[in-house]
Amino acid sequence: MFGIPGKQAVTITDRAASQIAKLMAKDNTQGLRIGVKKGGCAGMEYTMDYVSEVDPLDEVVEQNGARVMIAPMAQMFLFGTEIDYEVSLLESGFKFRNPNVTEACGCGESIKFDESLAPKG
């Protein structure tokens, strides 16, 4: 929808692809759908949901047995994002390195995008 021919909408690191593939196998799903919604102290938050059926309007990215679907309304916000999976002593989880983010809260889970990307109305 918002893609550039020959370029994936998002990239997935090997660590993230491995984790997504494990989750897909464990829960017998078609993949993970990522999106954004209003909320959090910076204005927007990422969403991730298991998917049992691929929506034909989703942007689908597949890599090393992992499948990520990008919800239609989130595609313009997520284009160019790298999805990683990090493990530390205190926490583990998916991390989004998104070039479209202009601000983030201290925990990094709430984000703000360039005003030109914000939906009007």
Image (cartoon, rainbow, N blue to C red):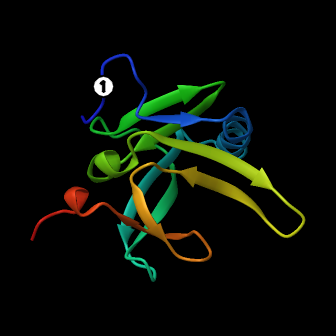
In the rendered image, the residue lying farthest to the top is 6
In the rendered image, the residue lying farthest to the bottom is 41
Residue 95 horizontal side relative to residue 74, left or right: right
Residue 116 horizontal side relative to residue 103, left or right: left
Residue 83 horizontal side relative to residue 91, left or right: left
Tell me if residue 47 comes above or below residue 70 in the rendering.
below
For disc 1, the marked residue is 4
Nearer the observer, 18 or 104: 104
Image quadrant for the N terminus?
Answer: top left
Image quadrant for the C terminus?
Answer: bottom left
Q: Where is residue 109 in the image (x, y as percent from the top left)?
A: 55, 70
Q: Locate residue 37: give its quadrant.
A: bottom left
Q: Residue at x 44, y 41 (%)?
A: 69
Question: Which amino acid does the dot numbered 1 rest on?
Answer: Ile
Tell me if residue 56 comes above or below residue 4 in the rendering.
below
Nearer the observer, 107 or 75: 107
